[in-house]
Amino acid sequence: MTERPDPVAIAIAHRIVQRRDQLGLSEATLAYRANMAPAYLRQLLSTGPQFDPPAFARIAAALGTSWPELLSGHRPDAPPGQADAEPRPLFHLTEPQCWELIGSHGVGRVGLPVGPAPVVLPVNYAVDARTIVYRTAPRGSAAPAEGSPASFQVDHIDDHRSDGWSVLILGEAHHIDDPQEQHRLAALPGATPWAGGSRPLWVRIRPAEVTGRRIGTG
């Protein structure tokens, strides 16, 4: 049985394309402003906001609007006929600024190549010598193959102020098998996963590229 397209996802995708054309942006430019690859942008538009909600908030900010406005198609507090707000300024972050925003630990999203489309999952992470480490189940969805490409993203979006920041790390994922190293990492702040169950596999993402954007404030 063929799955019916989600009408909400179709409507949101239409608004994104319409707003992008209104601003004179190409697909590549919008993806760049939202800190994602064009292929991932296309994936989001075809699957809908349930796939990666924070990514849609970044798209909205890159389009000079907010996620509620993009979802509903209108500004709830605007008088009839009022034009859309101008796009917020976009600032590129240096690599040291990116690491400062990521901090020593927190919750981010790891992106891994699984099947015909990437999978993006939230994980608790810790920072170790400018690499990202996290724990997961050996056969879990967040368990990458040794040496596989991986992305890691942390962001903060304020819908009310229409600003925020996003940091994207691209690199390779490696398993950490040394027991002494695992013991050392277990003592880092934020190293304990929030999710229960056995999660003995340690993964380290070694960055090849670290980029960041801030929208709304310098």
Image: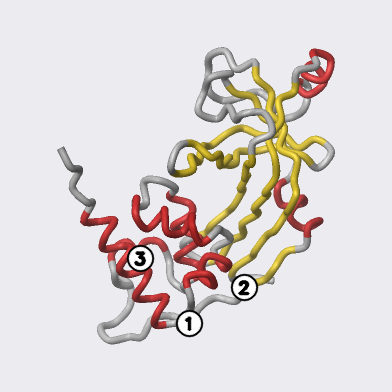
Q: Where is mark 1, residue-wise?
A: 86
The residue under the point 30% across, 68% down is: 14
Q: Which residue is mark 3?
A: 70
Q: Secondary structure at mark 2?
A: strand
Residue 109 position within the rendered picture, expressed as x and y whole percent measured from the top left: 56, 41
The residue sitting at 18% across, 47% down in the picture is: 4
Label 1 SS: loop
Q: Amino acid at mark 2?
A: Leu
In the rendered image, the vertical position of residue 31 relative to residue 23, given as above or below:
above
Q: Secondary structure at mark 3?
A: helix
Disc 3 to disc 1: CB gap under 8 Å? no
Q: Is residue 48 left or right of residue 173?
A: left
The percent coordinates of residue 104 (x first, y second) are 75, 39
Separation (CA) of disc 1 from disc 2? 12 Å
Identified by mark 1, the residue type is Glu
Amino acid type for the residue under numbered disc 3: Leu
Disc 3/disc 1 C-alpha distance (Å): 14 Å
Find the distance from the CA under tag 3 to the CA under tag 2.
19 Å
Dot 3 or dot 1: first in sequence order is 3
The quarter of the picture where the C terminus appears is bottom right
Instruction: Give the residue at x 26% y 63%.
Output: 11
Query: From the viewer's perspective, is residue 135 above or below residue 7?
Result: above
Q: Quadrant of the N terminus?
A: top left
Asked whether residue 190 appears in the rendered view, the answer is: no
Instruction: Check residue 90 in the rendering and tell me which mark sits there, or answer none.
Output: 2
Q: Nearer the viewer, residue 195 or 32?
A: 32
Viewer-proximal residue, 203 or 174? 174
